[in-house]
Image (cartoon, helix red, strand yellow):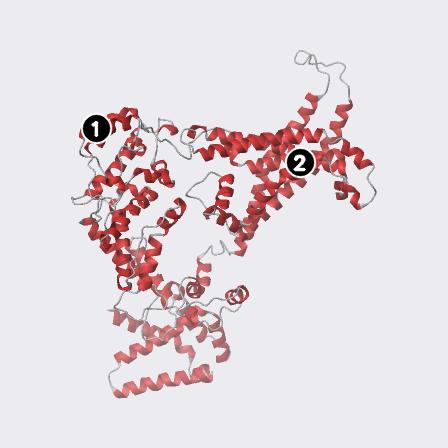
Amino acid sequence: KGNVANQREHLILLLANMHARLNPKSSSAPMLDERAVEELLAKTFESYLTWCKFLGRKSNIWLPSVKQEIQQHKLLYISLYLLIWGEASNLRLMPECLCYIFHHMSYELYGVLSGAVSLITGEKVRPAYGGEDESFLNKVVAPIYNEIYAEALKNKNGVSDHSTWRNYDDLNEFFWSADCFKLGWPMRLNNDFFFTSTKNKMSHETKIQNSQLPRGSSSAQNIVDSEVPDQSQQQTISVTSQQRWLGKTNFVEVRSFWHIFRSFDRLWTLLVLGLQILIIIAWHGLESPLQLLDPIFFEDILSIFITNAVLRVLQVVLDILFSWRTRGTMRSSQKLRFVIKLSLAVTWAIILPIFYSSSQNYKACSARRPKNFLGMFCLSKYMVAVAFYLTGNVIGMALFFVPAVSSYIETSTWRICNILSWWCQAPSYVGRGMHEGQVPLLKYTSFWTVLLSSKFIFSYYFEIKPLVEPTKEIMRVNVNIYEWHEFFPQVKSNAGAILAVWAPIILVYFMDTQIWYSVFCTIFGGMCGIVHHLGEIRTMGMVRSRFCTLPEVFNACLVPRSSPKEKKGILPSFLEKKIFKDLGKSERHDPTKFALVWNQIINSFRSEDLISNREMDLMTMPMSLEYRSGSIRWPLFLVAKKFSTAVDMAANFTGNSAQLFQRIKKDNYMFCAINDFYELTKSIFRFLVIGDVEKRVIAVIFAEIKKSIQNSSLLVDFKMDHLPLLVDKFERLAEILHM
């Protein structure tokens, strides 16, 4: 009952929230708008519909053909899901498990509403769990929670190995495949999902024997052979003896230093291949980019694909080793994927060196090639093998630069898309289609292109190239007498000396990438900070100078438009947003909404005792219904000293009135302070003065002031040197009124 009351209030608040956000507003205010119900239905069951699509099952949200009943059925489905969620307790951490529960209960709900008859029992469809108090909690939530609790006990406070027990995520992954429907409804407690270990076989047998499946259910799983109890018990024991622990299904933590290579395999591969290219270029003494077209030199450059094939074998082997602990629960399709990938990687690692070693005939071909542009197309077998080797990589690179296509392939249900997605990575329900947009991808690629280009250029000219000539000289020196014969008595070459020379440089080559990354992060971060104006407001003076722009920015970025947004092209929307944003946008200059939000923030600060009452009075924006819409009354901390400064300026000013007005209007806060004081003075006299004659005198005075302001003759018509004395009298009047 408590859950029903809570979720009823929850549903009412959700509908009220959706109804208040409708745009345009509904014409029939007392009635519930169908758009609000439809929007809430779509948001509530977005995850459930995605889950059904992933498993290839049809949704069990069935709507009647009668139009008048559609809204009621939608509300019932939403209410059912909220009731399941409210009673699920810790099962809320397993969202796909809730989808499974709702999938079956929504089918039963539709059967009850439509009066459907079960094809198996011939009776009307009734809920599988019902008729008792807290039956959902005891018969649906409790068994799953008991399984979670049993698995948590196997953790032994973090001492047990990660592969020996399942947590919430591991149990939830059971519902990522169509095998979860073997669990049945009502749920079979003898399913492997509820099996923890061999130690609790007896407890499982007791649960299975004591569980009574209700009759009259809508599914075939509800049929129970109650006529032969002994045979049922024997069958239960035999089934329990055949149970097995499901274990981890997709991931088991393996701690190894090889994660440094596996997690950054693309960067390591690029660095290794880049080092090989730089050494080849420096060894051949490249002086012009046109020398890259030389066939012999070009084939030496292509030798990097042999290295890439070897690194690919290492990557696949690491993938298999890190997934080895899940071999017992791994799907056969995933095992086949690993076998094919390892076979292809090993095959290419063998084929490419063989073709490269047998491509010596190509040098003779290149020597007698005709001296024209087409003569360079005398291809070797190794080049053809490299072309075939790059076919798969070209497809992967094309998908990388078009993230929209990659997202579509991962989320699509087409067979060809499933095959491509299966080859790229193991099938997973979460994380599909979560690719960055095209613009962030271009920014990311540009950043790393500039960074690695700078790093390779620096490494070539200051690390690799200076060592080539000394290395050649060391290789020309013959070893006649080796002084360290105790360690290497049979040495016939200078390989040790070459290794000693190159080892520090190679170590620096791999480690200075972090230095380049830090430098470029600083440069690009500073540029982004300048573009986005980060850190510009550092003092209270800057806060005062920028505060006047807050209402306009607030209305432009956070306040929705009163009229529906029209679809425009890229160029018109860009011009409106960046250039012509102030034209015809009166809504952006209305400070009322900003003042309401600002005052609410200040009040929350005071309620949390972060500021005092005096600070709250200084920071609150005054709201007055007497002023026209669009007028701004700034907080006191902005205009506190502006009025006294304006009084001193007017009393000692030596120019004309127009110059005085111009200087005052330059300071927005000063102008608002004078305007607020003037309007407040008029209001005070309007309420204090009682006699008609006195009212007419006051009205004439204010009329003369207004006339002088319009004629720019204020300094001529009035003695402004007496203004400070007048202000002192107003201060005394305010003190008397305050008393």
Where is residue 602 shown, x and y percent of the image? 33, 59
Task: Report if residue 506 is visible in the image.
Answer: yes
In terms of depth relative to the viewer, which is nearer, 239 or 427?
Answer: 239
In the image, is 125 to the left or to the right of 548?
left
Residue 109 to residue 632: above or below: above
Residue 1 to residue 555: above or below: above
In the image, is 401 to the left or to the right of 738?
right
The residue located at (30%, 24%) in the rendering is 198
Amino acid found under the numbered disc labelled 2: Ala
Pick whichever of labels 1 and 2 is earlier in the sequence: 1
For the residues labelled 1 and 2, say whether their Cβ atoms are less than 8 Å apart: no
In terms of depth relative to the viewer, which is nearer, 294 or 708?
Answer: 294
User: Residue 161 sits in which quadrant?
Assistant: top left
Q: Quadrant of the C terminus?
A: bottom left
Q: Identify the residue under disc 2.
A: 385
What element does badge 1 sit on? helix
Residue 127 to residue 305: above or below: below
In the image, is 204 to the left or to the right of 49?
left
Q: In front of the other: label 1 or label 2?
A: 1
The residue located at (24%, 83%) in the rendering is 690
Amino acid found under the numbered disc labelled 1: Gln
Tell me the distance, in whole angstroms, between the alpha carbons under discs 1 and 2: 65 Å
The residue located at (23%, 55%) in the rendering is 9
Task: Report if residue 601 is visible in the image.
Answer: no
Q: Identify the residue under disc 1.
A: 231
